Amino acid sequence: MLTPECPACKKLIQNVTLQETRIGPLLSDEGYRGLIYQCPFCAHVLGVGMDPISLKHDIVIQTADEVLSRIGSTLQQIANSLNQLLSRRG
């Protein structure tokens, strides 16, 4: 079994410190929220990964925006069709 030991300070790691970061192109707002996993004793970076909770949130927001956009387009098409029908009657 792997001993959870910091490779830098050699102390036994029972938990890690998390720090938020962006994962994506440099100098850009594009990308995803990520987490930096650090040794709680010496702050050595143990790893970096995507933040699963933030990723889930971003996917839900993007999906909802797309659905609302499509509903709006469909409603606009219905309104245009109704206006055409009403103008023919008038």
Image: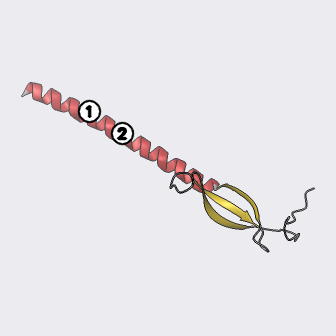
Q: Are marks 1 and 2 in contact (CB under 8 Å)?
A: no
**Is 16 or 57 nearer to us in this picture?**
16
Q: CA distance from mark 1 to mark 2?
A: 11 Å
Q: Amino acid at mark 1?
A: Ile
Q: Amino acid at mark 2?
A: Ile
Farthest-out residue, right: 1
In the image, what residue occupies the spot 50% across and 55% down? 29
Q: Taking 51 as reference, is 65 above or below it?
A: above
- Left or right of 29 on screen, residue 78: left
Can you identify the residue that label 2 sits on? 71
**Is 8 or 78 nearer to us in this picture?**
8
State the image quarter where residue 69 is shown. top left
Can you identify the residue that label 1 sits on? 78
Q: Earlier in the sequence, mark 1 or mark 2?
A: 2
Q: Tell me if mark 2 has few (under 14), some (14-19) or many (20+) residues whose alpha carbon lies within 10 angstroms of its own.
A: few
Farthest-out residue, front: 27
Residue 77, x across and y down, in percent: 27, 33
